[in-house]
Image (tube, helix red, strand yellow):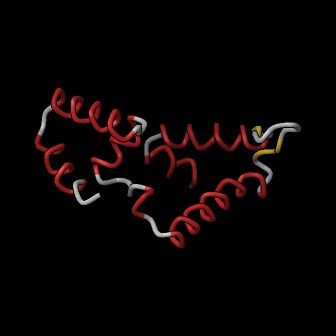
Amino acid sequence: MEWLPKLRVRYQKHHREGKSRMLDELCADYDYERNYAIKLLRGKSTPHALLSMEQARRHSATFSRKLRLPRAHGLTKKTQDSHRDLLTVEGRKLITLLMAARKAAIEQLTAFAA
């Protein structure tokens, strides 16, 4: 994938219509999802073909570990007959709290903490 750095430079120079055309071509040629192609061209992701087996194994292990963390802390629970996790009551409370804190101003948060 020696073409990727050159393509990234061209992508950065184009305006919206040109970027869209480049994404369409990349997705058609390599059968990539559009969001994955955007991440590749912005330099936010490494193509899976460029990862060594050891790097790919580490990526997989890290991802699996991050998926297990909420369950380990009681924020999600595994559903029967499915690979899905559902939020517990505590998980919903925590997410609601985090979303409210994210929307709040710094002054409000410091006043609340004091």
Give percent across and percent down for residue 7. 19, 49
Answer left or right for 93 relative to 7: right
Viewer-proximal residue, 30 or 102?
A: 30
Give percent across and percent down for residue 67. 67, 53
Q: Which corner quadrant of the image does residue 17 belong to?
A: top left
Outermost right residue: 80
Answer left or right for 53 relative to 37: right
Quarter occupied by the N terminus: bottom left
Quarter occupied by the C terminus: bottom right
Q: Residue at x 44, y 65 (%)?
A: 51
Give percent across and percent down for residue 60. 60, 61
Note whether 108 is above or below 23 in the view shown: below
Q: Which corner quadrant of the image does residue 37 belong to?
A: top left
Q: Residue at x 43, y 36 (%)?
A: 33
Question: Total label count?
Answer: 0
Answer left or right for 6 relative to 25: left
Outermost front residue: 29
Outermost top residue: 17
Give percent across and percent down for residue 78. 82, 44
Q: Residue at x 75, y 39 (%)?
A: 84
Note whether 4 is above or below 19 in the view shown: below
Q: Residue at x 87, y 37 (%)?
A: 81
Note whether 43 is above or below 56 in the view shown: above
Outermost left residue: 13
Viewer-proximal residue, 64 or 113?
A: 64
